[in-house]
Amino acid sequence: AKAAGRNTQRFFDPDMQAAVNARSNLEADLRQGLARNELLVHYQPVVDHQARLVGAEALVRWRHPQRGMISPGDFIPLAEQTGLILPLGQTVLETACRQLQRWGQDAATAHLSISVNVSARQFRQPGFVAEVLDTLKAHRAEPQRLKLELTESLLLGDIEDTIVRMEQLKAQGVGFALDDFGTGYSSLSYLKRLPLDQIKIDQSFVRDVLSDPNDAAIVRTILALAKSLDLQVVAEGVETTGQLGFLRLHGCEGFQGYLFGRPVPVEELDAMLDPTR
Ligand code: C2E
Ligand code: CA
Ligand code: CA
Ligand code: CA
C-alpha cells in the first residue's frame, strides 16, 4: 500500500499537494493554537457623530509561534470549514465578556459596548443562546453592552429559527447588528422581520464614496432605509475626513475605521481613553 501511495503521488501536481499539506498543517496548528491560548482579541474603536468612543469591535488575531501575527481572513474560513470556529468563537466571546465586566467597574467606561462577530455555524449550533447567556453571567457582564454581529449569509438559513434565537437573546438585552450590509442577499422584507438594532455599511461602499456615484447612491439609500426602519448605522472602513463628511451629511451617526483607530490590544484602547492611567 505504501508503494502504491508513492506511485500515485507522482500523478499529483506538486503545487496541489503543497496546498493540501499547508491546509492540514494550518488546521493542526490552529487546533493547537486554541489550546495554547495563541488566539487573542484586538479592539477597534466605534465612535458617534461627535467622534466620542461608544464601543469597540472585537477582532480575533492569531499569534502564531513561527509565522507571527495572522489576520482572521487567513484562518476564519478554515475555522468555519473544520468546526474550530466553535471553540474559537467561544474564546472571543469570553474575552469580550471579561472586558465588558472590567469596563463596567469604572464610571468612565461603563457605557462602552463590545461587538462580537458570530459566524453562521456558531449561531446555528443548538446550544448557542444558552452559551451566550451563560458566558455573560459567568463573567458578570451586562447583556445590554454586548452586540452580536451577524452577516447576511446567515439569513439564507432558517429565518424562523434565526428570529427565535435573536428574540431569546434580545429578551435578555443583547443587541444585534447586521454586518457587511449591502454585500449579501438579504431581502428587505427579512430586514424588517429581524429584531436588529444596527446595520453596518460595508467598507467596500465607503471606500470610493466620494469618487463613485454608484457607491454614493448605495450609501445614501442604506442610510435612508435605516432611518425609516429605525436602525442605528455604523459605517465601516472610514479612513478620510472626506468620507466622514459625506456620511455625516447623509445622516450617518456611527463610524469605525482607521481615521478613528485601528484594531489594537485593549491596553492601548484603555490608554487612549485615559492617558494619565
Ligand atoms: P469585519 O467584521 O467586516 O471587520 C472589519 C474589518 O475591517 C477588520 O479586519 C478591520 O481591521 C478592518 N478595518 C477596519 N477599519 C478599516 C479601515 O479604515 N480600512 C480598512 N482597509 N480596513 C479596516 P480584520 O480584523 O482583518 O477582520 C476580517 C474579518 O474577519 C472580519 O470582517 C470578520 O468577518 C472576521 N472576523 C474577525 N474576528 C472574528 C471573530 O472573532 N469571529 C468571526 N466569526 N469572524 C471574525
Ligand atoms: Ca464585523
Ligand atoms: Ca463588517
Ligand atoms: Ca468584511
Image (cartoon, grey):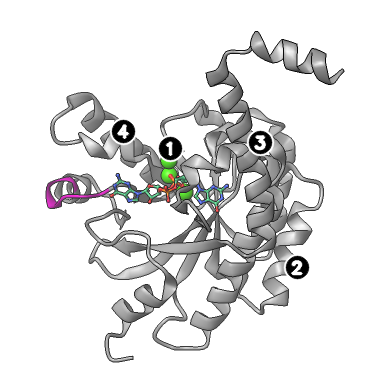
At label 1, counting other C-alpha atoms closer than 10 Å, the crowd grade (few under 14, some 14-19, many 20 or more) is: many
At label 3, counting other C-alpha atoms closer than 10 Å, the crowd grade (few under 14, some 14-19, many 20 or more) is: few
- Callout 4 touching callout 3 (CB < 8 Å): no
Lower position in the chain sequence, tag 1 or tag 2: 2
The residue identified by callout 1 is 181
Which quarter of the image is occupied by the N terminus? top right
Tag nearer the camera, 1 or 2: 2
Residue drawn 36% across the image and 51% down it: 234
At label 2, counting other C-alpha atoms closer than 10 Å, the crowd grade (few under 14, some 14-19, many 20 or more) is: few
Residue type at mark 4 is Thr
Q: Quick one: 217 or 83, which is closer to the camera? A: 83
Give the structural element (helix, strand or loop) at label 3: helix
Q: Residue 153 at what x, y percent from top left? A: 57, 32
Residue type at mark 3 is Ser
The residue furthest bottom is: 276
Give the structural element (helix, strand or loop) at label 4: helix
